[in-house]
Image (cartoon, grey):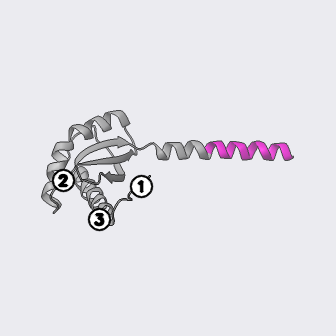
Amino acid sequence: MPARKSPSNRSFKVADQIQRDLTELIARELKDPRVGMVTLQAVEVTPDYAHAKVYFSLLVGDPQETEEALNQAAGFLRNGLFKRLHIHTVPTLHFHFDRTTERAADMNALIAKAVASRSKDSD
């Protein structure tokens, strides 16, 4: 079975540039009131640069509504990227809410609870 090819360094650079440019586009040019304080966590680009998964988190607001608004604005944002990036193919954007911070907070709460119960048992 052949080994799976790891993403190239260029792929990481393109994803990083897309993340930076999208952050600026969303903050400065996207006027949708459903999109509040969005933080782009990561961008994953397919090897052929046809699609990009954009993971975001929110400070305040409804994640479902924001995801819907961002996906509706994907064409507008892709057009903005086309003007900024100097690559042959600008990927189609797919936005996904990143629940990593929520899960981390839940895990920290569980760990704190376990530590507290353990210290009660040892007393």
| Residue type (three-letter) at the residue carrying disc 2 | Val
User: Spatial distance from mark 2 to mark 1, Cα to Cα?
Assistant: 29 Å
Task: Please identify the quarter of the rendering in which residue 8 is found.
Answer: bottom left
Q: Earlier in the sequence, mark 1 or mark 3?
A: 1
Residue drawn at point x = 31 percent, y = 38 percent: 66
**Observer able to see residue 62:** no
Say which element carries label 1. loop
Check disc 2 and report the residue beneath it: 90
Image marks 1 and 3: residues in contact by CB distance under 8 Å: no
Relative to 121, does residue 18 appear above or below in the rendering? below
Q: Main secondary structure of the magenta part?
A: helix
In depth, the one of 49 and 54 nearer the eye is: 49
Point out residue 65 in the picture as x, y percentages from the top left corner.
32, 33
Q: Residues within 10 Å of mark 2 (few under 14, many from 20)?
A: some
Residue drawn at point x = 15 percent, y = 58 percent: 88
Task: Please identify the quarter of the rendering in which residue 23 is found.
Answer: bottom left
Residue drawn at point x = 36 percent, y = 47 percent: 55
Say which element carries label 3. helix
Using residue 28 as the reference point, say whether residue 105 is left or right of it.
Answer: right
In depth, the one of 99 and 8 nearer the eye is: 8
Task: Please identify the quarter of the rendering in which residue 107 is found.
Answer: top right
Check disc 3 and report the residue beneath it: 10
Using residue 25 as the reference point, say whether residue 11 is left or right of it.
Answer: right
Q: Residues within 10 Å of mark 1 (few under 14, many from 20)?
A: few
Question: Where are the magenta residues, as a range?
Answer: 109-122
Check disc 1 and report the residue beneath it: 2
Task: Nearest to the eye among marks 3 and 2: give it.
Answer: 3
Say which element carries label 2. loop
